[in-house]
Image (tube, rainbow, N blue to C red):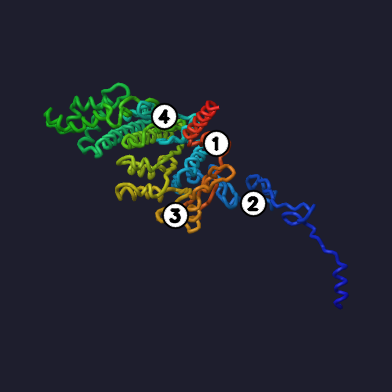
Amino acid sequence: MTKTSAKKRTQATPSIRPIRPPMRGWLGRGRGGANYVQAPDEWRGTTVQVCGLWPFSIGSGTPMVGVPLGRHITTGATLCCDPISWFQRAKLISNPSAFVLGKPGLGKSTLVRRMATGLAGFGVMPLVLGDLKPDYVDLIEAMGGQVITLGRGRGYLNVLDPGEATEAAHRLRAQGFEKQAQEVLADAHGRRHTMVSALITIMRSAPPTDREETIIDRALKVLDVQHQGVPVLGDLLRVIQEGPQEVRAVALDRGNDLRYKEITENLEASLIGLVGGGRLGETFSRQTTRPMRRDAPVVYDVSAIDDSEMDLQAATLLACWSAGFGTVNVANALADAGLEPRRHYFVILDELWRALRAGRGMVDRVDALTRLNRQRGVGMAMISHTMSDLLALSSEEDRMKAKGFVERSGMVICGGLPSAEMPQLNSAIPFSRAEQDLLIGWQDPPAWDPSTGREAEPPGRGKFLVKVGGRPGIPISVQLTDAELSINDTNKLWHSQSRVGSVAMAGAGGGAA
């Protein structure tokens, strides 16, 4: 073929347009090209329901067992995740607990509130045993649960109150479960003994002696026999002061009144400090203002206690934990006997760093809870800011125990964290370099929004990385529903201040006019 004929044929052959347009349509004037491709609608269903839609159905790529927590940042797939469901149903973790880490203001409490809300729908009772901010009062109120307020002049918690143990023991005995009834009463006695010893430890900054421990134990038993109704610390003090024969026998006073008074003098002084309104006030010296129930969500609101009162915070948190887990044991005993349905509880320990620093013995208490939650039928969520908070305790022994909280957790959920945290975090849970960079990027400060003159949304707000052991982390974004927005405002006091300020400014402007 000559060049001339080839040229003529090229000119004669019209350009062939593709039968199907490209993804964004044909470009050009009047041809319907689009700069933005709208995402198609999505529906979710089981493989049985959507099998006829092949090949238009895709797998989620993330576990779908548990509370819908958020969407995968890369794929958009929904992640369902909570420590109880992943332990009980999915068998993905060996311990029903989660540890949440992240800088303030990025949504850690909001994430745990989402878990608590979803688990409540599954029949799991949320227990917030010490809300220091408070962050969970609105949530528990919306669920129709109990809000128990504690603090100076606001509420009292009697550490000698056995709670629902006495009633449960009567029910067990009536049904022929004598052994179980004795176990319930023995557990209640042990908790009361432990709490009295803990309060004395906080008062003295040193634990009671072995002899004093024995005296407290025997005095409580005498009190249970002699006292009608629920005793208080003042009744325990009176028994020790009167010195019945059972107490004198364990005090080894040798029949000498003067010797008995010398032996019990320090113990008596400590109890007077607890009863008479020392630095712990009268919080534990009166009858419980509002007893806790086992059949409803509960939050202990201790936000009225100032951060400067570290001893009172420590004592109150210990008392809340003792009352809460005592109620859980009663529920388990009744369920084991077939007298009530089995209940599971989701215990939330928010601001854990404040609890650990609140006083001596707090680390050991949390350590015991994290080791026994599986046997108690209890899921747990512990929340703190950084690993440095856990490793800033006074003794090396406490620091190693606190690090173990993260290592033993079934899952670790991390928000934005500074780069200095990565070596400490990586020593507890392995993180890849890409995962570390992701967490570091989420803690960056927000940019200014020139259109509004205010700060934009922080880049890491609502974003978390879910880690289970050495598996790759799942990055998710948590978006609140309209129903959740009203119970997830942790800056109410600032909004009130802004409104008052706006009214004042408006009034000032009106006066000037």
Residue behind mark 1: 485
**Tag 3 or tag 4, which sits nearer the N-term?**
4
In the displayed image of the protein, which residue is found farthest to the top?
228
- Label 2, label 3: how many angstroms apart (C-alpha)? 37 Å
Query: Based on the displayed image, in which of its 4 quarters is residue 251 positioned?
Result: top left
In the displayed image of the protein, which residue is found farthest to the bottom?
2
Residue behind mark 4: 148
Q: Which mark is residue 58?
A: 2
Q: Residue at x 86, y 68 (%)?
A: 11
Q: Residues within 10 Å of mark 2 (few under 14, many from 20)?
A: few
Identify the element where label 3 is drawn.
Answer: helix
Does residue 107 appear in this view?
Answer: yes
34 up-or-down from 262: above or below: below
Q: Residue at x 42, y 36 (%)?
A: 133
Of circles 1 and 3, which is in front?
A: 3
Query: Based on the displayed image, in which of its 4 quarters is residue 175 positioned?
Result: top left
Left or right? Give the position of 461 relative to 5.
left
**Tag 4 or tag 1, which sits nearer the N-term?**
4
Q: Residues within 10 Å of mark 1 (few under 14, many from 20)?
A: few
Identify the element where label 1 is drawn.
Answer: helix
- Label 1, label 3: how many angstroms apart (C-alpha)? 31 Å
Asked if labels 3 and 1 touch by Cβ distance under 8 angstroms, the answer is no
